[in-house]
Amino acid sequence: MRLAGFDYRRDALYCEEVALEHIAARAGTPCYVYSSRGILESFSAYDQGLAGLPHRVCYAVKANSSLAVLALLDRAGAGFDIVSGGELFRVLAAGAEASRVVFSGVGKTAPEIEYALDSGICCFNAESEAELGLIDALAARRSLRPRVGLRVNPDVDAATHPYISTGLRQHKFGIALRDAEAIFQRAAQWPHLSLEGVSCHIGSQLLTAAPLEEALDHLLDLAARVPAVRFLDLGGGVGVPYQPEQQAPDVTAFLTRVRERLAGHDLFFFIEPGRSIVAEAGVLLTRVLYRKNSVAKEFVVVDAAMNDLIRPSLYEAHHEILPVRRPARGKILADVVGPVCETGDFLALDREMDNVLPGDLLAVATAGAYCFVAASNYNSRPRPPEILVEGLAWRTIRARESYPDLIRGEQV
Ligand code: LLP
């Protein structure tokens, strides 16, 4: 595990220059806290790592789509990878330019394609011939000729959780590599689009970069055979360490190898990292409500639940749980559970952790990516607020939901 923008000062956990105890006292718990410095440092590892190569780092909006986070990355020069009309709306609402947006996704609808065409996005990554046909038809009506890349499925094993592995032939994503060349040969069939790139995304949370490099080699092979190919898009970035001893690929070393492979090719390069930009720069703050033990187990009941942070329940994901103030009361072995009425509602199982008491604050680490975005109102729980820290300053970038928010749009 690594924290980006958080550290202990004496025995208290800080985000940049602000004590998390202070934020919890003002904003309440549960709440998400993000470090702008942590986010910007991770982004610049990608951007600097590709210096010298014509490139754009398109942040994968799905990882954390808060407007303030998008605006921060926009100011740093990021592009954006979107997978829905809603994500495009967010990117534009954050003040970013559509011309830096790449639209990925296996099931784009006609209204979403129209919205993207009318906004003037940079390119589409199309995933089937039927989608090429639809983009072509909708572009024709507007006398447009959008840039399109073909998402191929390189049949490379990303060696990650099966739910987030996407680059094997049995997965729904992309077009089989062997069919791609023929599609480029038939490109004249779609005169209202310019088919000029190849993309892939083999999966998320990759703890070695080798499969990404193997996928890149497949894209390069295809580009060598198809002169129309002017850009490559490698999809998401590398994974991050969630566990204490876990190692993740070094972004700079990985991108050095990418640059070596691309040297001498006249190709524009896109990469769409999400997790590795924001995950380590976020925590979920939660307060201990109760201690409880059954015959078999010790429980720490906290005020955050699976609706706030579903990764442990959904992927059996491990998130480190840190005391916001280090107590010196020794260690316990416990399940950290929330108030939701499901046995699957846990943040940690059989965890050796500090001997916390009711009222103590905990920080669930590595919670900047795929956490708030997947939060729900299950059990009619209002979603927590999001807070962004910048040095000494912190502000609420999304308010805690209220009870009236829970029933907005409903009728008796
Ligand atoms: N590009 C495309 C087309 C994607 O589908 C994804 C992630 C990314 C880029 C960003 O990949 P990253 O750099 O974050 O690895 N909810 C899951 C993760 C789902 C990832 C889906 N696609 C989790 O909590 O682990």
Image (cartoon, helix red, strand yellow):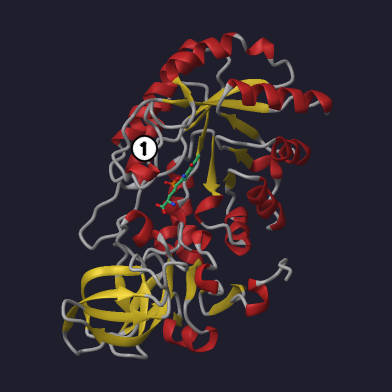
Rendered residue at 31%/63% (across/down): 2
Front in this rendered view, residue 307 or 16:
307
Q: Position of residue 409 (x, y in %)?
A: 73, 66
**Residue 387 visible:** no
Q: Is residue 141 above or below residue 85?
A: above
Q: Residue at x 34, y 61 (%)?
A: 312
Looking at the rendered structure, the number of numbered marks drawn on it comes to: 1
What percent of the width, then of the height, locates residue 359? 37, 91
User: Quick check: is the Cβ at mark 1 less than 8 Å away from ligand 1?
Assistant: no
What amino acid is at disc 1? Thr
Looking at the image, is 69 positioned above or below residue 230? below
Task: Choose between 107 and 59: the one closer to the eye.
Answer: 107
| Along the line of sight, the residue nearer the viewer: 398 or 338 | 338
Can see residue 244?
yes
Q: Is residue 42 left or right of residue 241?
A: right
Q: Residue at x 45, y 54 (%)?
A: 277
Q: For the point 29% across and 50% down, which residue is it?
A: 248
Disc 1: CA contacts within 10 A as few (<14), some (14-19) or many (>=20) = some
Q: Which image quadrant for residue 217? A: top left
Residue 411, percent from left and from top: 74, 68
Q: Nearer the viewer, residue 361 or 77?
A: 361
Residue 65: x and y in percent read 57, 57
> Which quadrant, please, contains the N terminus?
bottom left
> Looking at the rendering, which quadrant does residue 201 occupy?
top left
Secondary structure of the residue carrying tag 1 is: helix
Residue found at the far right of this picture: 142
- The residue where tag 1 is placed is 256
Quadrant of the snapshot with the C terminus: bottom right
